[in-house]
Image: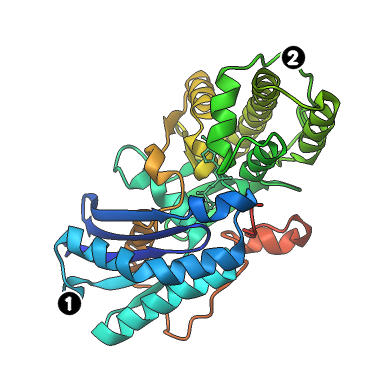
Amino acid sequence: MSMKPLTILGIETSCDETAAAVLRLHEHGPEVLSDIVLGQAAQHAPYKGVVPEIAARAHVEGLDGTIALAMREAGLGFGALDGVAATAGPGLIGGVLVGLTAGKAIALAHGLPLIAVNHLEGHALSPRLSGKGATFPYLLLLVSGGHCQFIAVMNVGVYRRLGTTVDDALGEAFDKLAKLLDLGFPGGPLVEQAARAGDSTRFSLPRPLLGREGCDFSFAGLKTACVREAERLGAPNYQDKADLCASFQAAVLDIVTDRTRNAMALFDPIWGAKGRLVAAGGVAANLALRGKLEALAAERNYDFVAPPLKWCTDNAAMIALAGAERLRLGFSDELSFVARPRWPLDEAAAASRPSHAPGRKGAKA
Ligand code: KG4
Ligand code: ZN
């Protein structure tokens, strides 16, 4: 039976990007009709991190215009939509409320189904936006400002967490180092840039959990070691900073490679055939990390897929895709759906290890 294409407006406001996108899901895959991201970096930069109150206000001010632009670029009126998908968590709750409420209002006014999307599901499905190769099932490394986990993505809505961070998320570690070295905001790309000019052997930094079994992560020890080295440097010049960034990034790459090897060993018996490794989330925009993962995948006879850089960081196209996929399966949500500051993707795994606080995306300051 051939499927009618579904046209979905996606809304994303869970952190510091105000985003709206229109996506059409055809039987053969998604088509992004518009994809607007209004960043807030300038508002947060003086504080060197995301300030939740400022983020929520900026979403209020920017969301209407962002949605209007997304609809205009798609050349559609609300009547042409089949549904509205809005991020309903996890994230900074003020921002999530702004986007979810806007989504509910549009759904109510135009008699459309609402799909309350888990932001992590958006990231998990984002490699499917470009339609190249990310067929189910795949081993997902989700690395963002609030999350660092391995998930076996079996199908839409079927996620099994294999490992997670026991302390900080990887993006958070990048952001903290940038703040420590006064590199600017947002931190991740600036650390990557500085690392390119640095000597990665100058500082010997710890690699927590390296060689241990399983595929959990820990970055607290690495972060503390960076703080200690920065204190020792006193007033570092740019070369000092670049060397510390390069040494940090080298440690990160060693850790991620080691953990990914173990995650593959856990994933292989679940799947069996040639595996597929997928990286998503803001830190997956890091080219050194992508290169390392690609090499590891080749070594282990895995395919490697990562979304284009613009779909690694927060965007609404991935939310629209998650909404469309869910709607296609017959899922939609009540207008009374309550926004969730915490919302793990694999609820069963999260419940068994509550101390790991998965699914939380807090201020990245
Ligand atoms: O997915 P995302 O936009 O927001 C969350 O859901 O958290 O991820 C943002 C995170 C930030 O911590 C940012 O510093 C990091 O991704 N990031 C990077 C790079 N680009 C963004 N980290 C390392 N290297 C990059 N090139
Ligand atoms: Zn995100």
In percent of the image, x 62 and y 46: which residue is there? 149
- Relative placement, left or right, of 361 versus 42 is right
Near-viewer residue (179 or 85): 179
Measured from the top left, where is residue 350 in percent x and y?
68, 60
**Which of the labelled discs sits on residue 118, or is there none?**
none
The image shows residue 350, relative to residue 110, as above or below, that is above
Give the amino acid type for the residue marked by disc 2 in the picture. Arg
Instruction: Specify the quadrant that holds the N terminus.
Output: bottom left
Question: Are there few (<14), some (14-19), or many (20+) residues within 10 Å of tag 1?
Answer: few
Residue 96 visible in the shown view: yes
Coloring applied to the structure = rainbow
Q: Secondary structure at mark 1?
A: helix
What whole-number distance in Å separates the C-alpha atoms at marks 1 and 2?
A: 60 Å
Q: Is mark 2 within 8 Å of ligand 1?
A: no
Question: Are there few (<14), some (14-19), or many (20+) residues within 10 Å of tag 2?
Answer: few
The image shows residue 318, relative to residue 193, as above or below, that is below
Give the amino acid type for the residue marked by disc 1 in the picture. Gly
Residue at numbered disc 1: 79
In percent of the image, x 59 and y 39: which residue is there? 184
Place residue 267 in its image quadrant.
top right
- Relative placement, left or right, of 253 versus 56 is right
In percent of the image, x 28 and y 80: which residue is there? 112
- Relative placement, left or right, of 54 versus 208 is left
Measured from the top left, where is residue 356 in percent x and y?
74, 55
Near-viewer residue (347 or 110): 110
Dot 1 or dot 2: first in sequence order is: 1
Measured from the top left, where is residue 341 in percent x and y?
61, 69
Comparing marks 1 and 2, which lies closer to the viewer?
2
Residue at numbered disc 2: 202
